[in-house]
């Protein structure tokens, strides 16, 4: 809560370069700039409806390259009620972002599915916000995203700034389908497509193992972790009617690790690296059945900063 008007007022503004130097972006500071994931440093695993000859679904594993830009700085203010004669005010700062992802998949399967090498497979625009006031909520970071498929989401979360004891800090990200209540489907869906690897160097049952391999024995000198979920407080996902009816997108959980890595070249600055894992739950019955199944859609990537 602030008793006096903020430096930038209570509207919404994109700040000039000079003004940006006066703003504290908190845990989002390290995101600023443009990042790239080299080919085969990003991976997409998603189950989609398919013919009954493939168990009623098709599992797509698509390696990709990515560009992710966080700029410029935006600032916004919200006014609340008066409490003891003082108006409650909230000031948010954040970064507009833009994400584009292109397939680098060389296989006949990807060609047949429309994801041949060079095909753009995802585009996303949104905002990451930081709220240091904690008014009405324990959550200090939020992500607002719009996706051209017909989805809009609000994810809320928290951050930490701690170095892990070792590089084995990635939790499992299981791609196995479950019932809506979280139990085993008992339908054998994980026995054929899931356990037959499409790429020898990629564990499609737990994509996070690739993040661990990408980090390797790198020496982390700094790390900020952002954890966000649409299942927190007022978060959620809105879908257009076709998606809602046929392949309902129900939740998103994402973790971003903003890292500084010791440069192996003596005297050179640390390397800026960004890793993320994201799980989106899709709910639809396999073709020819009526039982709704939760199919985790997982994307992971390791990116390097290419410009500030």
Image: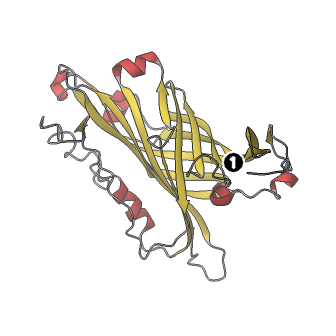
Instruction: State how many labels appear.
Output: 1
Residue 80 appears at what percent x and percent y? 72, 39
- Determine the residue positioned at 45% across, 38% down: 117
Q: Nearer the viewer, residue 278 or 33?
A: 278
Q: Nearer the viewer, residue 35 or 104?
A: 35
- Say whether residue 50 is left or right of residue 138: left
Q: Quadrant of residue 74?
A: top right
Q: Is residue 291 above or below residue 267?
A: above
Q: Is residue 163 above or below residue 108?
A: below
- Say whether residue 155 is left or right of residue 209: right
Farthest residue toward the bottom? 266
Residue 221 appears at what percent x and percent y? 56, 75
Q: Quadrant of residue 48?
A: top left
- Determine the residue positioned at 24% across, 47% down: 197
Residue 221 in sight: yes
Badge 1 crowding class, 10 Å Cα cut-off, few under 14, some 14 to 19, many 20 or more, is many
Q: How is the image coloured?
A: secondary structure
Mark 1 — residue?
A: 94
- Determine the residue positioned at 40% across, 30% down: 249
Residue 119 in sight: no
- Say whether residue 223 is left or right of residue 113: right
Q: Nearer the viewer, residue 106 or 272?
A: 272
Q: Quadrant of residue 108?
A: top left
The kind of secondary structure element at disc 1 is strand
Residue 259 appears at what percent x and percent y? 55, 65
Q: Quadrant of the C terminus?
A: bottom right
- Say whether residue 167 is left or right of residue 189: right
Residue 303 appears at what percent x and percent y? 54, 56
Q: Is residue 169 above or below residue 255?
A: below
């Amino acid at each position: 809560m602030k008793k006096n008007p903020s430096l930038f007022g209570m509207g919404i503004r994109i700040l000039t370069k000079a003004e940006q130097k006066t703003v504290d972006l908190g845990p989002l500071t390290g995101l600023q700039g443009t990042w790239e994931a080299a080919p085969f440093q990003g991976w997409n695993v998603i189950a989609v409806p398919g013919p009954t000859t493939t168990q009623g679904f098709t599992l797509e594993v698509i390696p990709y390259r990515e560009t992710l830009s966080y700029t410029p700085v935006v600032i916004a203010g919200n006014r609340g009620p008066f409490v003891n004669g003082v108006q409650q005010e909230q000031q948010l700062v954040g970064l507009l972002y833009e994400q584009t992802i292109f397939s680098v998949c060389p296989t006949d399967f990807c060609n047949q599915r429309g994801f041949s090498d060079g095909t753009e497979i995802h585009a996303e625009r949104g905002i990451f916000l930081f709220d240091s006031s904690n008014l009405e909520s324990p959550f200090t970071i939020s992500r607002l995203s719009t996706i051209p498929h017909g989805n809009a989401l609000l994810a809320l979360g928290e951050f930490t700034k701690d170095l892990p004891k070792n590089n084995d800090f990635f939790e499992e990200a299981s791609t196995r389908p479950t019932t809506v209540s979280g139990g085993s489907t008992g339908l054998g869906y994980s026995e054929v497509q899931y356990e037959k690897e499409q790429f020898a160097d990629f564990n499609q049952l737990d994509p996070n193992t690739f993040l661990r391999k990408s980090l390797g024995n790198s020496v982390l000198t700094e790390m900020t972790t952002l954890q966000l979920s649409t299942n927190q407080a007022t978060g959620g996902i809105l879908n257009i009617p076709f998606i809602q009816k046929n392949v309902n997108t129900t939740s998103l959980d994402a973790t971003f690790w903003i890292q500084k890595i010791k440069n192996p070249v003596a005297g050179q600055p640390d390397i800026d690296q960004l890793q993320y894992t994201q799980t989106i739950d899709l709910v639809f019955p396999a073709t020819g059945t009526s039982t709704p199944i939760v199919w985790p859609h997982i994307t992971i990537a390791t990116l390097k900063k290419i410009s500030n």
